Amino acid sequence: SPWPLSRVVEGLHQFVTKTSARDAEYKWERLRQENENGELMDVAALAREILTIAKLRPITTEWELKKKLVEALHREIAYRVAEHIEIDDESVSWRARPAC
């Protein structure tokens, strides 16, 4: 007997949800401020992209958002921004390094 439309829709929804979450996780892991050509994304654009991808993930905590931003920054920018980064289960904190 044919499947009722509600069952087909439910099956497709589960597939799309899993696929979207997997795609979001792939993008999350690879997101960096510097692309393959050495070009830097604006920090504000990077933050917006992190937020956009975070909405597609099943769960993203505030701590994960902050950690991802620090990890995604170009190392020289991250070095200037954060002399000492402390990341624990609840927060990310840093002290600014003076500009050279």
Image: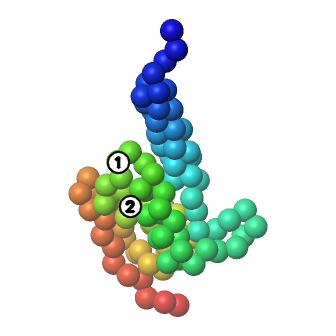
Q: Is residue 76 above or below residue 69?
A: below
Camera-near label (2 vs 1) is 1
CA distance for labels 2 and 1: 11 Å
The local secondary structure at tag 2 comes to helix
Q: In this view, does 52 lie to the left or right of 90?
A: right
Instruction: Specify few, some or many for label 2: CA neighbours under 10 Å numbering under 14, 14-19, or 20 or more.
Output: some
Three-letter amino acid code at disc 1?
A: Ile
State which tag comes first along the sequence, 2 or 1.
Answer: 1
Q: In this view, does 74 lie to the left or right of 66?
A: right
Residue 57: x percent and y percent?
43, 48
Q: Nearer the viewer, residue 52 or 50?
A: 52
Farthest left residue in view: 90
Q: In this view, does 94 lie above or below 90?
A: below
Q: Nearer the viewer, residue 98 or 93?
A: 93
Q: Which of 99 and 8 is in front in this view?
A: 8
Farthest top residue in view: 1
Q: In this view, does 64 lie above or below 99?
A: above
Count of numbered marks: 2
The local secondary structure at tag 1 comes to loop
The residue that mark 1 highlights is 59
Residue 23: x percent and y percent?
56, 45
Q: In this view, does 29 lie to the left or right of 95?
A: right
Name the residue rendered at 41%, 74% in the picture. Answer: 82
Name the residue rendered at 49%, 18% in the picture. Answer: 3
Name the residue rendered at 31%, 55% in the picture. Answer: 61
Three-letter amino acid code at disc 2?
A: Leu
Name the residue rendered at 48%, 89% in the picture. Answer: 99
The residue that mark 2 highlights is 65
Farthest right residue in view: 37
Q: Is residue 8 visible?
A: yes
